[in-house]
Image (spheres, coloured by chain):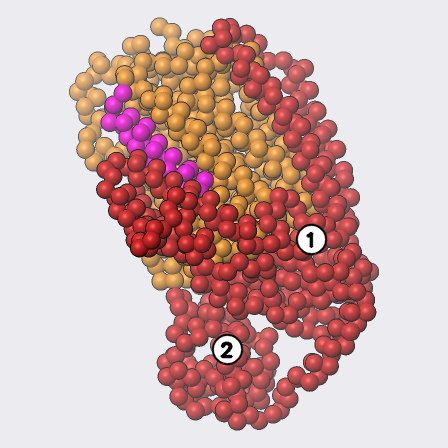
Chain colours: A red, B orange
Amino acid sequence: MLGYNKRLLNFEIQRQLAACPLSGGGRIGHKPHAGESGQSRIIKDIEEVNMMKSISNKLASLLLMAGAWAGTTAFTAAQAVNDLPGGPAVNQLNLHPAVTKIAAEQQWLHWFLLIICTVIFVAVFGVMFYSILKHRKSVGHKPADFHESVAVEIAWTVIPFIIVILMALPATKTVVAMKDTSNADLTIKVTGYQWKWGYDYLKGEGEGIGFISSLDSTHRAMSESGKPAPTDDYLLKVDNPLVVPVDKKIRIITTANDVIHAFMVPAFGIKQDAIPGFVRDTWFRAEQTGDFYGQCAELCGKEHAYMPIHVKVLSAEDYAKWVDGQKKAMAAKADDPAKVWALGELVQRGEKVYAANCAVCHQANGKGAGPFKPLDASAIVLDADKSKQIGVVLNGRAAMPSWKQLSDTEIAAVITYTKNSWSNKTGQLVQPADIKTARK
Amino acid sequence: MSAVLDHHDHHAHDDHHAPSGWRRWVFATNHKDIGTLYLLFAFTMLMIGGVLALLIRAELFQPGLQVVNPELFNQLTTMHGVIMVFGAIMPAFVGFANWMIPLQIGAADMAFARMNNFSFWLMIPAALMVVLSFFMPGGAPAAGWTFYAPLTLQMGPSMDAGIFALHILGASSIMGSINIIVTVLNMRAPGMTLMKMPLFCWTWLITAYLLIAVMPVLAGAITMTLTDRHFGTTFFNPAAGGDPVMFQHIFWFFGHPEVYIMILPAFGIISAIVPAFARKKLFGYASMVYATASIAILSFIVWAHHMYTTGMPVTGQLFFMYATMLISVPTGVKIFNWLATMWKGSMTFEAPMLWAVGFIFVFTMGGFTGLILSMAPVDIQLQDTYYVVAHFHYVLVAGSLFAMFAGIYYWLPKWTGVMYSETRGKIHFWWSMISFNITFFPMHFLGLAGMPRRYADYPMQFADFNAIASVGAFGFGLAQVFFFFAVVLPAMRGQGPKAPQKPWEGAEGLEWEVPSPAPFHTFETPPKLDATATKIIG
């Protein structure tokens, strides 16, 4: 244990140093003096701590330090971060404000249960604490002799049973409503990828629109830095939010590409697992416009915390405008799959695809990390037979998922990029047509 | 007394049976020694699992990644769960069973003494494999303690080590359970009828049946995972037509009874302690037995309440919701029975009773959040959030672990022959109780606000409650270090006032009919019992 505590102490130093700029250069009881930096002060503290002989002193001061520091951080955080409308509020105590009927019913049910439970809790433990106060030996209470009573025992079996039935009745109604996904105005397929969301508008206004939505990359970098600046939508900001019209029944069909994810938007009262190889559905009808946030709710690998959901609810007119804009942009953006690319422009394109999809595991420098294999100097990447690498990218291998959801052009570009980056100088060029053939 | 202590007459015989040094432990066949081994092993694993938990809490102290990367974070959450469930709580209860069941039913030892040794020592390689998997290529398994497919198919070789370890632990549990069932059913002293047996034996008898029923189910699930990973089968691999949801059904068919495996023996311990310190017989003994059996049976038909968000048909969701809510009825009966036992008693509050009352209070909070979670529409909001984390720590830490502490303080004088320090016991209790609630109570709010579990980093609005929880967690961890140095170690070294045969005025049962510490061999010839089967006559 001691070794561990020491390491913990070191870790405390680092955390303290990290916390200093946030808390305005000091912490409770330790304002840095002139000519003495916060760092040397803290190190002096630690030395003092180390000199103490007894374990308990060491532990106690550690606890104090943690407490003081927690106080400081809590104070700073509360000052700097604001509530995020449609997302979490600072120190939120209850469910999100309901934006759909189902969410409102869930909230009602939760209160209903919480009140019943609290009343029972107070009653039962009122009795217990009364007994603890009055029926103790120190006040001279003599033990009674009873140890069974059929009537009482039947009563406290039957009464809870009745209470449970009363609780189940309203819940049943909500379950049935929740599960009714029929007669939707708009159907959207939500696909979970490691680690982003794909949205495809299948039926209704906007049919044919499809895009990928991933976390704003600056937020991932902020997280990695260890001291993210106060940001209201930290880890909730995406590049392309899911856009839906207000007051329309939206049916969400979930599936996944690799592992199980879960699509959750608390304000709508929905959470539905996205299961690879299967489709499931849920629905919502947002009753107000605005931005609403959620996150992936099923452990899906290392970047599980970094695939947020942002739903933008627009008025009917705004939604129609958005659909129009999307359609035009899609037409303009579509790659001609028959195009024959030059090496330079394909590498350029591939670098973007790599940064967006591959760098998270294989790293920007291509060196990989842990179980994620390096691409730099990799035999498969350098191999003159380009079909090997195409096969791996299309079908996945071991820890690597399949990437066949990318377009032919994107896959061709990213393979060309890896074959001609870092120390890899093969000069090989993979064209979209190669991918098209390989897909067959 | 002579029936109890007849080894005084057979000194040569006794020496032959009480080996010393390492042989005593490696070749242990004595139920008391094996019980001690189990308890020490469980405590070691509790500390290892605790260190992992503190690393998790250190990372979550502030938004941003400071201590571990997200991959290691997932390994920590996974291994914290695996180690605490399979390494700490389950073996600890088996330790209690080994120590107390023969003493409570007047048996000389467990039915299969050598198998008992084997089931303990099997756990050591399994535990080593689990703990050392952090140093395997790619690190420890990171798919969560529930091992959901197909994420498990992406794991490195440590996943196979984990599967192998779970197989071994499962075999150990099954052997332990068979041993307990055979001991309880066949080795009771004459006059110790089933319905006179202490409730701890009853709850363990039922638990042992649960274990035998579900451990093979877990073994099946993880074996299929293993063959999916290496031998080209596709039970759970959707890429070739497998069904990942089937894994969850199989896993939770094991997993839900497992939850009761981890709490029923705790109910037994509490049912021994509350009457002892209320100086009054346990209220509703028979209904306690029936309630335990009902909970065990119901536990087999509620598994899919862990899976409301997988998208079950409406009838499935309703069935599992009703069945789950039903479990609160027998659980309520138990709480009421304990209260009725306390009612009009003559209570004192030594450490065991403090822990028992603390258990009832906090465990009930976990029970109520369980009831709230059982309701499918509400669970849709709370599934996989910190609310669930709060809930199961209230029932597993404040439930199982607190009951074990109660049991340890209660029986420690019998095990070691010395009294622990009451002051230290009280410090341990209040320190744990307060820091536990500081740690886990704020998690209810985090969950309601929608913070998903198993997240290495989180939106900043969640920062304060996370900071509070982390501070509480370090306090709670230190409380257990205090417990080890201030209570366990002195007791093991025999420091402290000598314990009388029956240190608790109101305690009943055969374990208090033998001296403290309990001699190496007890009840070598079956004792003659009085009509209540709690005292030895003649």
User: Which image quadrant: the C terminus of chain B?
Assistant: top left
- Which chain is disc 1 placed on? A
Specify the farthest residue to the front: A34
| Residue identifier under label 1 | A267
Q: Nearer the viewer, residue A110 or B233?
A: A110
Task: Work out whether A235 lies above or below B356.
Answer: below
Residue at screen point 33% across, 13% down: B501
Q: Is residue B487 magenta?
A: yes
How far is mark 1 from mark 2, CA to CA?
34 Å
The mark total stands at: 2
Q: Is residue B130 left or right of residue B387?
A: left
Q: Chain of mark 2?
A: A
Q: Position of residue A26 (x, y in %)?
A: 41, 51
Considering the numbered disc 2 on the image, is that residue within a helix, a strand or a loop?
Answer: helix
Q: Quadrant of residue B342?
A: top right
Image quarter of the N terminus of chain B:
top left
Q: Is the residue marked by circle 1 packed among few (<14), some (14-19), or many (20+) residues within 10 Å?
A: many
What's drawn in magenta, residue-wise?
A: B471-496
